[in-house]
Image (tube, rainbow, N blue to C red):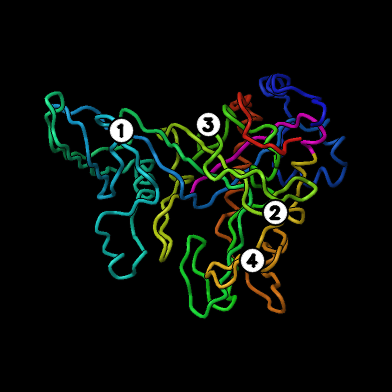
């Protein structure tokens, strides 16, 4: 690990005084290319990142308030979307990928749902009323067996976005070698290498700007859904032990984040319910992570460009198990990649435009002194950390 040249407190003091130098990840890439990481580390205090894409492992903890008489909910639906009620009394968890009960679209196109948990979350942050129905088996202390009510986000005593796996550090590029169109969480894939879909914001992506997680962990303050949020643990399927390039960037899916924030402070622009044909429902989530430039090594990491990031092209029809190729994000964002002798058009599932906007918003918050760095109390696991 490189010698620390700055501390979190020194950077936060500069933020409080309005003196912090903040660049977005794209701006830092250009600066490092121009002046090198040593000089960039002296000039810059914070680099902001961003990503906006469907993140299936997302959801909300909700407390809908005690009824009269009280109820210990056993089954709960929000706009006919089942929520998990195996907690206590009126606490539930609503998952983003849970489809609406008896969704009529699924009968016409199996695996396709018009409405699900992600849409309920979007409706709540949009201020729309949501129908809540609860059933219970009844006890002496919780005698109520059935409740129906209409609620808004502001009516709920408690609503917290808690996403077990977000902001994947790199992800596969998906193609289809089979002879028929297939429908996946990576979108529709045309037969015989008809298209190649990918879902990472490249040089703007949070974990690709800190590949060894030197500044990421429990207590890191982030942009989440348009408001302040936190990294609270490593996400499920967190896999740091994968092959990496010399710059530390993983060559395949690797680190993930578990994140948390107050749903009542968030915006429908940054939490959007989505339906993916033939797969199901999800939630598009906006996340931005500030990376403190502690030293030249961190400057070099945040200077990563799309040309420095690679990923594997995988066949999602399972016709072939081994990767078909390794491509850079510069190639992916050009609109065409070459697999063997064939040129294949590329399609992003993540929005670079929205990612750029998130990095810009976070930059402004820090420059205005509204957002300080959170010091991680426990770093994300990485046995390969230098």
Dividing the picture into quadrants, the one containing residue 358 is top right
Picture layout, residue 82 above or below residue 185: above
The answer to whether 252 is drawn above or below residue 290 in the figure is: below
Rendered image: mark on residue 53: none
Label 3 and label 1: CA atoms lie apart by: 20 Å
Indicate left or right for 116 with 20 as reference: left
- Label tally: 4
Task: Name the residue that disc number 3 marks.
Answer: 232
Circle 1 SS class? loop
Name the residue located 34 percent from the left edge and 47 percent from the top edge: 120
Rounded to the nearest angstrom, the CA distance separating label 4 from label 2 is 14 Å
Disc 2 packing (10 Å; few <14; some 14–19; many ≥20):
many
Q: Magenta span covers which residues? A: 284-299
Residue for badge 2? 251
Q: Earlier in the sequence, mark 4 or mark 2?
A: 2
> Which element is circle 2 on?
loop
Q: CA distance from mark 4 to mark 1?
A: 42 Å
What residue is at 34 percent from the left and 39 percent from the top? 93
* Circle 1 Cα neighbour tier, 10 Å, few/some/many (<14 / 14–19 / ≥20): few
Quarter the C terminus occupies: top right
Residue drawn at the location 24% of the way across and 42% of the way down: 76
**Residue 205 in picture, x, y percent from top left:** 64, 47
Mark carried by residue 87? 1
Q: Earlier in the sequence, mark 3 or mark 4?
A: 3
Between marks 3 and 1 in the image, the one whose residue lies nearer the viewer: 1
Q: Quadrant of the N terminus?
A: top right
């Amino acid at each position: 690990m490189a010698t620390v040249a700055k501390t979190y407190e020194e950077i936060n003091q500069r933020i409080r005084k309005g003196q912090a130098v903040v660049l977005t990840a794209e701006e830092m890439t250009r600066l490092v290319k121009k002046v090198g990481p040593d000089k960039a580390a002296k000039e810059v205090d914070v680099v902001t990142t961003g990503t906006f894409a469907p993140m299936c492992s997302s959801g909300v903890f909700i407390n809908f308030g005690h009824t009269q008489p009280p109820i210990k909910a056993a089954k709960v639906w929000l706009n006919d979307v089942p929520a998990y009620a195996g907690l206590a009394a009126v606490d539930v968890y609503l998952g983003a990928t849970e489809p609406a009960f008896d969704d009529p679209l699924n009968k016409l196109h199996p695996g396709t749902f018009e409405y699900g948990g992600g849409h309920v979350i979007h409706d709540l942050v949009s201020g729309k009323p949501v129908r809540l129905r609860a059933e219970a088996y009844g006890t002496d202390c919780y005698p109520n067996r059935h409740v129906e009510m209409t609620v808004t986000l502001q009516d709920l005593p408690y609503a917290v976005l808690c996403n077990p796996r977000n902001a994947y550090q790199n992800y596969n590029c998906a193609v289809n070698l089979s002879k028929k169109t297939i429908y996946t969480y990576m979108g529709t894939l045309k037969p015989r290498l008809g298209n190649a879909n990918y879902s990472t914001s490249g040089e703007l992506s949070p974990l690709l700007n800190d590949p060894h997680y030197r500044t990421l962990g429990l207590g890191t303050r982030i942009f989440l859904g348009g408001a302040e949020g936190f990294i609270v643990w490593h996400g499920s399927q967190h896999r740091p032990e994968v092959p990496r390039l010399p710059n530390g960037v993983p060559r395949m899916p690797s680190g993930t984040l578990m994140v948390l924030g107050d749903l009542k402070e968030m915006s429908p622009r940054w939490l959007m319910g989505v339906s993916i044909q033939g797969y199901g429902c999800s939630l598009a989530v906006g996340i931005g992570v500030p990376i403190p430039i502690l030293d030249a090594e961190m400057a070099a990491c945040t200077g990563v460009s799309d040309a420095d990031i690679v990923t594997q092209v995988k066949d999602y029809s399972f016709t072939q198990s081994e990767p078909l190729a390794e491509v850079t994000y510069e190639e992916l964002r050009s609109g065409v990649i070459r697999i063997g002798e064939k040129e294949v058009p590329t399609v992003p599932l993540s929005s670079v435009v929205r990612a750029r906007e998130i990095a810009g918003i976070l930059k402004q918050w820090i420059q205005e002194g509204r957002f300080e760095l959170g010091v991680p109390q426990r770093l994300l696991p990485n046995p390969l950390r230098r």
